Image (tube, helix red, strand yellow):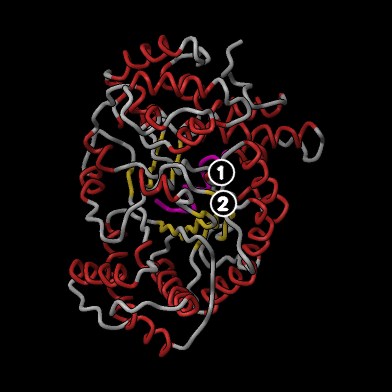
Amino acid sequence: MKFINDSFMIGNARGVQLYQDIAKGLPIIDYHCHLDAREIYENKNYDNITQLWLAGDHYKWRAMRANGIEEKYITGDASAEEKFAAWAQTVEASFGNPLYHWTHLELHHYFHCDELLDSHNWKEIMEHCNSLLSGADFSPRQLITRANVEVICTTDSPLDSLYYHQRLSEESDFPVKVLPTFRPDEVFENNAKAFSLFIDKLSDITAINIATFADFSAAIGERIRFFHQTGCRVSDHGPVEIHYKSASETTVSSLFLRKRAGQALSKDESIILNSAIFIMLAHHYKKHNWAMQIHFGAIRNNNTKMHQLLGINTGFDALTDQYQLAENLNGLLDAMAKDNALPKTILYNLNASYNDLVATTIANFQSADCGVKSPMQLGSGWWFNDTRRGMENQLACLADQGLLMNFVGMLTDSRSLVSYTRHDYFRRILCNLIGGWVERKEVPDNNNILSRMIRNICHDNARDYFNF
């Protein structure tokens, strides 16, 4: 039997049936990723499998370093063939790591290759993949279409022109919606001079003289309107920690003016200003019926030597912890709710030990105000948690503390055009979990409810929640 088959990752008959009959064929709504709209628009084929697989993939780079591979063969100037050979050596050492599964799901789904990659057959597999990559089926748009994707949400700066999103929306022969996501990391910039420079650019692009906090809100609102007109329905935030501290409008205005002038703020002052900025942003999101995503808990660029050598997003990040997270998270959401500014919100915590903390916090702020079921969502297993263990923990926690039926499901959070197999990976894990409940007689074998549950989580909830 082939390694990748309909029972792969599913250990019970009911789960296999749910996967085959429901989950397998559903379209994908990828509501958070890091694909490049320009790359999709230009639609240029990759030169080789190494370029497609290894360029920019810090998941693989971390594994290769752990396998003793020299940096030359990871991010250095080694040939594409040498890098692929080094990756193949790492694959055969990766039993138990999701990279082993992802690798073979991608080979199976995109390259119709069911050989198991290792240090002995790497050259044959590389040549097979390379022979296909120049074909029409392997352009970026075709890779996306073949994965049965309906919607892609990229990650974009508030200052982005969204030129390529606009051009893609005019492409009648490409049915996939490629929509922007509003990612305002710059508004939380700790460096006051960098923050002031961002405000100058924001002022120029909106033609608003930003002299006060109210002017700042107006300029941000103008960019949000522009994003909305270009199809955006979701924002994203990536703080290391969640903090909340209230203050008067006078204090907030004063702190904004100081930072606007390039003056450094203390830690407490930064928390006060950032709290006010978060609530201001939430007001705008709610006005446009957007969903607000918050990915928190990643401490980045921890290897100073390698950061200086290679830059950001090169595989030297880790999860972090936080003192008094519950107090701060509840405080921030409560401040938004009191100000009638709490939009649909998805919280992704990177430290899985906080799953129940976040899930019980979310339950405090559920309501019917946003017109969708479970407007407050516990986001899918993220980054170091998009593993079988991480996904099962997140799903079980959500089922314990909320309503799994209303979950908006999986996302790729990836820069790779062939990472859509992660949705398949998730769907298999989901079907295995629910099928196991049935076989252990923990839930009734009601096909109508079970089918709706799988369809909801894999597709329909995201469609209704985001309203793309």
Image quadrant of residue 431?
A: top right
Residue at (54%, 46%) from the top-left corner? 382
421 over 80 or under it: above or below: below
269 over 90 or under it: above or below: below
Marks 1/2: CA–CA distance:
8 Å
Residue at (37%, 12%) from the top-left corner? 128
Dot 2 surroundings within 10 Å: few (below 14), some, or many (20 or more)?
A: some
> How many marks on residues?
2
Q: Is 20 or 392 nearer to us in this picture?
A: 392
Q: Quadrant of the N terminus?
A: top right
Residue at (57%, 31%) from the top-left corner? 98
Q: Which mark is residue 273?
A: none
Residue 458, x across and y down, in percent: 54, 40
Dot 1 surroundings within 10 Å: few (below 14), some, or many (20 or more)?
A: some
Q: Who comes first in sequence, dot 1 or dot 2?
A: 2
Three-letter amino acid code of the residue under disc 2: Leu
Residue 116 colored magenta? no
Give the magenta range: 455-468
Left or right relative to 27: residue 386: right
Q: Which mark is residue 384?
A: 1
Residue 464 colored magenta? yes
Q: Secondary structure at mark 1?
A: helix
Q: Is 171 or 394 nearer to us in this picture?
A: 394
Comparing labels 1 and 2, the label whose residue is closer to the camera: 2
**Is label 1 in contact with label 2 (beta carbons under 8 Å)?**
yes
Q: Main secondary structure of the magenta part?
A: helix
Residue 257, x across and y down, in percent: 32, 83
Q: Which mark is residue 319?
A: 2
Residue 151, x across and y down, in percent: 39, 42
Q: Secondary structure at mark 2?
A: strand
Q: Is 359 or 251 nearer to us in this picture?
A: 251
